[in-house]
Image (tube, rainbow, N blue to C red):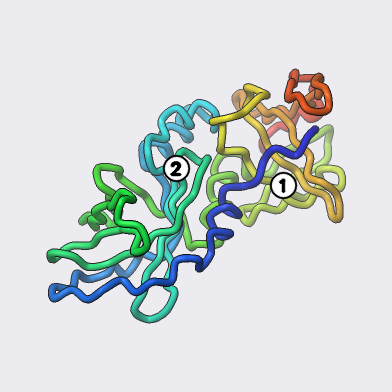
Amino acid sequence: MKNRFFPIIALLFMIGSCNNAPSGNNTVQAKIPDNLGGYWVSDTWWQSLQSTKSPMKAAEKTGDVAAAIFHQEDSTKWLVDLSYGWHEGQQLTVRSKDGGLQVYDPMNATVHQYSLTPQPDGSIQLDATAMVRLGDAFTGFNVIASTLVGGEYDLGGKSVVFNPKGTVVGLDDYYRYELLLDYVAEDVHADQIMLSKEGRTPEFYAFKIEGNHLQLFEIDDMGSKDEFKYEIGKLKYDLTKK
């Protein structure tokens, strides 16, 4: 299968420290929440993912900001890597303004500026988008996959475990798993999981969650060298959750 998928977590961190301009001086300083650092996702998307068990269906509920990774560059400067629809990313800066918090681009005043509003329950809002924190900046992405498919399964009498840290044990020689979250320009039209072996190109499978069964299907590449055209193939693994 052609390598089409680059995890959004990698995209966001590749944005890196390209944005190093000072955030400016403001007379009124708003307090940064103690729990701001970490991996946040749209609450609407998160609830949809858990109810549908389908990243592809949940993607329809993503809205503007899908995810936000807040992290400190130094003791005084906060940055945020935003994901738009799980498809694009941009790094912005957090600043105090008019007694509140704002997310903005210090290099480009035409970029949309988001109000950042801490909520009493510990969540935050970016403009009107409610965000929930899944974990720290480096592990929050794994929470998504492990919430959906994590746990111990039976595969023909053999134990297979999808661990919370993104590792898988007992499924042939695979050692890592991730879920595809970006379905904006996607050609398979099915929920997909990426499985990795040491030193090998990651492999993709279509998956379905039916009751306590996690079913992984092969994806057949039917396109030419420069054409993306796929069909769902035969069932490869039928795992029963213990």
| Horizontal and vertical percent position of residue 153 | 71, 39
Tell me: 205 left or right of 189.
right
Instruction: Using the numbered discs, state the Cα–Cα distance from disc 1 to disc 2 in whole angstroms.
Output: 32 Å
**Residue at the (13%, 76%) spot, across then down:** 27
Tell me which corner region of the image, top left, top right, bottom left or bottom right, holds residue 204. Answer: top right
User: CB under 8 Å between callouts 1 and 2?
Assistant: no
Discs 1/2, front: 2
Q: Quadrant of the N terminus?
A: top right
| Horizontal and vertical percent position of residue 174 | 81, 47
Secondary element under disc 2, as helix, strand or loop, is: strand
- In the picture, the disc for residue 161 is 1
- In the picture, the disc for residue 197 is none
Q: Amino acid at mark 1?
A: Val
* Placement of 238 over or under 86, stated as above or below: above
**Residue at the (53%, 59%) spot, across then down:** 15
Q: Quadrant of the C terminus?
A: top right
- Please give the count of numbered marks on the rendered protein: 2
Tell me: 31 left or right of 224.
left
Secondary element under disc 1, as helix, strand or loop, is: strand
* Placement of 99 over or under 148, stated as above or below: below
Q: Amino acid at mark 2?
A: Tyr
Tell me: 148 left or right of 49.
right
Tell me: 143 left or right of 64.
right
**Residue at the (80%, 21%) spot, across then down:** 223
> 231 and 174: which one is in front?
231
Tell me which corner region of the image, top left, top right, bottom left or bottom right, holds residue 60. Answer: top left
- In the picture, the disc for residue 84 is 2
**Residue at the (62%, 40%) spot, across then down:** 179
